[in-house]
Image (cartoon, rainbow, N blue to C red):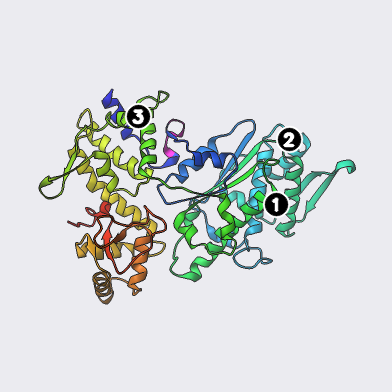
Amino acid sequence: MTNTLLHEIAEWRLEAKLEDNERYFFHTADVTLLENGSRSYLIGRKGTGKTAICEYLYKQTGPKRFSRKLTFKSFPFNNLYQLENNRFKTPNQYITLWKYLIYSSVAKMMIENQNIDSDVRMNLEKVYGNDPVVSLQRTISKWTGKNFEFTILGTGGAAGRTQNEVSNDMPWIERVEILENLIQQNLDDSSYMIVFDELDEDYKDVSEPEKYSQYNALITSLFKAIQDIRSIFALPDYKVFPILFLRDDIYDLVKDPDKSKWSDLIIELDWNTDKIKQLLTFRISRALDASGNILYFDEAWDKIFLHQHVEYGFQQKKRMSPFDFITRSTLIRPRDYVRYIRACAMSASANNLPRVSPEIIRKVDKAFSNELKGEMVDEAEGFLPEMREVFDIISHMRKQKFSFSEFSIAYQTSVERGLLPKRDAEFILKVLFHFSIVGNQPRQKMVQIFRYQNKEARLNLNESLCVHRGLYKALQII
């Protein structure tokens, strides 16, 4: 049975879209807040489970629950930038666009709702069609195109039914108002969920403001559009739930006077070791039996790992539990643990071992380090396109801890050799700190300060800097 368990864990997926969500999705209180409409923005770092939650919400449909996913993976954002509303100043010029897309998505879902007036559904089907959404790019191009015939049948009370016609060149704000009225007049007690995912596809060149301004305006406008819609379609009378999934580093860069007003609708997706243990207990239990009882953590963990400490350090004189050894190499994200444990299970299963040994854990640590470095490069390149070369500087320094002056000298040397563009060394370190590539090592304290452990932490250049433990092997740091 144990070998079967290891084989099942070896098939775990890092990509949430490929995961057996029905079997492995770990439902938390945060998910409930999104489901019942209490929250509309989910902010979190890559690897913290945003896409898994998005996939779960999108697939939870029923007779009174409808959902649409607007994913911007490989989307040509320039097409959106051309659809700005010049009646609004930056960064609000895309609010009408987002409201139009959200309302159109709701209208299209209303076609599927048998409780909606049949004449309304028939008319909406003439406008939007009842074909499945194959391509978001094609859908948006159709809905915003000049040839899109927009005739909406509304309810006119005692006056009977009225036709609301909008010419193809009429401003969208009039289309938005007509859709808004129609939705308000015809919604039942069903819920309509519109999830926005993978909006980081055009997140790049952040260090060059002129290239980032349009993207920032687009994201800011979406926050405001959702806030506006939630105020118009307020609970408990309406259940229109647009939900935005966004990386925390992108959210941190959004600067707007209204930003503080969004806090009531925000969930910041954070993990600690206790929550991670609950997640792993659930996943291991489900790997053992897709519909069985959830075990206790120690019971579940011991079904995979030998109950032995991992020896490490000079002449292997230090000892640590398998969970703690793995944790120190992670950023305490679900993806990190899934990746590490999956690799351990693959190795043990390939060698026909009943459980994962300390030797396998140490062996996997090197491969995990290289993968973690690759993820951090991908994540930070929006700030620093030369992120790989910056990693080379740290690798060449060969130090777990270093000072600001040591890094500045090494960085300046690389600039003079033409290996890097000239930037401020302090800015470089702030980026590294932001992504928890480096942290602070306070004097006379054993604890290290990393942002992934404390979002309020700020870089202190008067203290020693330390490299994240998970990067040691990838950077060849002794």
Amino acid type at mark 2: Ile
Residue 116 has which mark? 2
Judge by depth and name the residue closer to the eye, 393 or 253: 253
> Residue lying farthest right?
159
Can you say which quadrant of the picture contains the N terminus? top left
Mark 3 crowdedness (10 Å alpha carbons): few <14, some 14-19, many ≥20: few
**What secondary structure is found at the residue carrying circle 2?**
loop
Magenta residue span: 18-23
Q: What is the quadrant of residue 292 in the picture?
A: top left
C-alpha separation, residue under disc 1 versus residue under disc 2: 24 Å
Residue at (70%, 31%) from the top-left corner? 114
C-alpha separation, residue under disc 1 versus residue under disc 3: 57 Å
Which residue is the site of mark 3? Answer: 296
Say left or right for 385 vs 169.
Answer: left
Q: Is residue 53 magenta?
A: no
Q: Is residue 41 visible?
A: yes
Place of residue 207 in the rendered image (x, y in percent of width and height, measured from the top left): 43, 68
Which residue is the site of mark 1? Answer: 148
Mark 2 crowdedness (10 Å alpha carbons): few <14, some 14-19, many ≥20: some
Place of residue 343 in the rendered image (x, y in percent of width and height, measured from the top left): 27, 39
Q: Work out whether mark 1 precedes mark 3 in sequence or the reverse, and give the earlier one.
A: 1
Say left or right for 439 vs 106.
Answer: left
Q: Is residue 22 magenta?
A: yes
Q: Is residue 98 visible?
A: no
Can you say which quadrant of the picture contains the C terminus? bottom left
Amino acid type at mark 3: Tyr
Residue at (32%, 29%) from the top-left corner? 300
Q: Work out whether mark 1 precedes mark 2 in sequence or the reverse, and give the earlier one.
A: 2
